[in-house]
Amino acid sequence: MAEEKRTKQSHSTAVKRLQATAAAGAYQKKWFAELKARVEAGEDFGYLNADVPMEILRAMDIPFVVNQWWAAICGAKRMTQKYFGLLREAGYRDDLCSYCATALAESMDPDDHKVDADGKPMGPWGGLPTPTVAITRLTCDCQSKIFELFAQNHGADFYAMENTVARKAPLKWFELAPDHWEDLYDTDRLDSGVEELKELIRFLEMKTGKMFDINKLEHVMNLINEQEMWYKKTRDLIAASHPVPVTVVDTINAVMQAQWQRGTQWATDHAKSLYEEVKALADEGKAAVPNEKYRLMWIGRGIWHDFSFYQRFEEKYGAVFMWSMYLAMGADAYIRNHVEEDPLRALSARYIGMEDFLHMPPWNSQWYQQQAAQNDIDGVVYMVPENCMQAVEGSYFIKKTLEDAGIPVLIFKADPVDARKWSADTMTGLVEEFIETQVIPSKDARQKNKN
C-alpha cells in the first residue's frame, strides 16, 4: 500500500503555521547581521559547541555562534554538498560527523564571503564571521580535533573544556534537575564543573579584555529559567491537546533558534509569545492536522535539509509528528532554580549532565518512555546519524525500552545536514510502511483491549 500512491517528494517546502516560527527566523537574521558588524568592527567572536556553557559568554557580552545551529543553517541552505566536497578534496574522510565538520568544511570555501553576479551572498547568510576563539568540550575525540582544525584555519584560539562521567544514574532525572541537583549528581562532579567554569572565565577575560560579573550571570540564568518555564507550559499543553494545535515543524525552529539566544530578554519574551499563540489555538480547538489519528514522536536531530519530510504523512494517514527533543529538552533539562545561592554551581548543574540526558541510557531511554506516555504517542521514528558515534546514544536500549512499553519504533540512519545520501522517496516509503504495518495495528490492538 505504501508504494501505490507515492509522489516525488524531494525539495518540497514545509508549511509553517505559527507567527512565532516566522518571528524567530526574522530575529535570527537581524541578530546575525548585527553580530557580523560587531566582529568586523574588531570584537572577539566565539564559535561554541552546543554543550559549552554559553551563559558565561552571554554574561560577558562576547558575541558567539553555536556550532549545531550554524550547521543547521548550512544544511537548510543546501550548502553542505559543496562543503563536504571541499573536505574530500582536502584529503579528509568522507564520513566525518557532519554536525561538527560543516563549519570546518566551510572554512575551506574561498567563496564564502563573496557575492555572485546578482549581488547575492554566496555563503549562507553571507558566511560565518572569522572567529577568534573556538570552544568545545571533550565529549567526543573527533569533535575536539575538528574544532582544533577549524580554529587553525581561522587563526583562532582553541579551548577545550573537560567532560566528566556520571557514577550514578538516579531515576527520573527530569524531576530532580530543577531543584535537587545535589542529589542528581556526585558532589565532586559538580565541584569539577564549577572549577571548569572559573578556568573558562579566566581564559575569556585574558583573551577579550572583558570582565566577568557574577550579578550579570545571575540575571542571565534567571531569564533562562523563565524562558524554559514557558517551554514547559507549551510542551505540557501540546501533550494534553487532542488533537494537537501544532506539529514539530512549527515548534522545532521556533524553539531551537531562541534556545541559542537564551539569556536575553528577547528569547524569554519569544518563549512566552510561543506559549500564548499555541494556547490560543488550543483554546479555539484548532487542529494542526484535522484528521489526526496517530501521534508520532521524532527522536534525533532535525532533518534540516528536508523539513517537509515531517508533514508527508498527515493527509494520507492522519499521522502527526508532534514531539521532538527540542521543546521537551527545553522544558526538562535547563531549569535550575535558586540561582541566587550560587550562580556558577547552578550553571555547572545545567551543563555537566546534558550529554547524559541525551546520549546515555538509562537517562535518555527512561525520559523518552516518560515523554511518550505523557504525549499519548502511537509510534516513534528514530533517526540515528550514521557518522556520529556520540549520537548512537544506546539506540538498542532506547528502542527496547519503548517497545517493552508497547510503543512501536522505527530506526533508520540518515544525516541531519548532509543530503548527499538522502532519498526523500525512500525515507517517506520507509515511514509509510512503518505506519501501516506497526503503528496502525498496534493502536488498533490497544483500543480493542480497552474495549
Image (cartoon, rainbow, N blue to C red):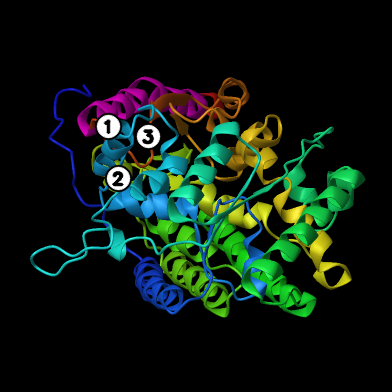
Give the quadrant of the N terminus. top left
Specify whether residue 439 is painted magenta. yes
Q: Say if 207 sits above or below 101 in the image.
A: below
Task: Provide the residue designation for mark 1.
Answer: 422
Which portion, as a residue range, is magenta? 424-448
Residue 85: x %, y % from top left:
26, 36
| Horizontal and vertical percent position of residue 131 | 48, 61
Task: Name the disc covering residue 415, or none.
Answer: 3
Q: In this view, does 185 lie to the left or right of 384?
A: right
Crowding near pointer 3: few (<14 within 10 Å), some, many (20+)? many
Q: Sequence order check: which comes first, mark 3 or mark 1?
A: 3
Q: What residue type is labelled 1?
A: Trp
Residue 320 place in picture, x, y as percent: 37, 44
Residue sitting nearer the eye, 7 or 288: 7
Q: How far apart are marks 1 and 2 (CA)?
A: 9 Å
Amino acid identity at mark 2: His
Q: Do the residues labelled 1 and 2 touch (CB within 8 Å)?
A: yes
Q: Residue at x 31, y 25 (%)?
A: 430
Residue picked out by circle 2: 305
Circle 2 SS class: loop
Per the model, the C-alpha gap separating discs 3 and 1 is 8 Å
Q: Are marks 3 and 2 in contact (CB under 8 Å)?
A: no
In the rendered view, would you say 437 is above or below 378?
above
Secondary structure beneath label 3: loop
Amino acid type of the residue tagged 3 in the rendering: Asp
Task: Looking at this view, name the residue that lies furthest to the left.
Answer: 117
Q: Mark 3 to mark 2: distance in Å?
A: 9 Å
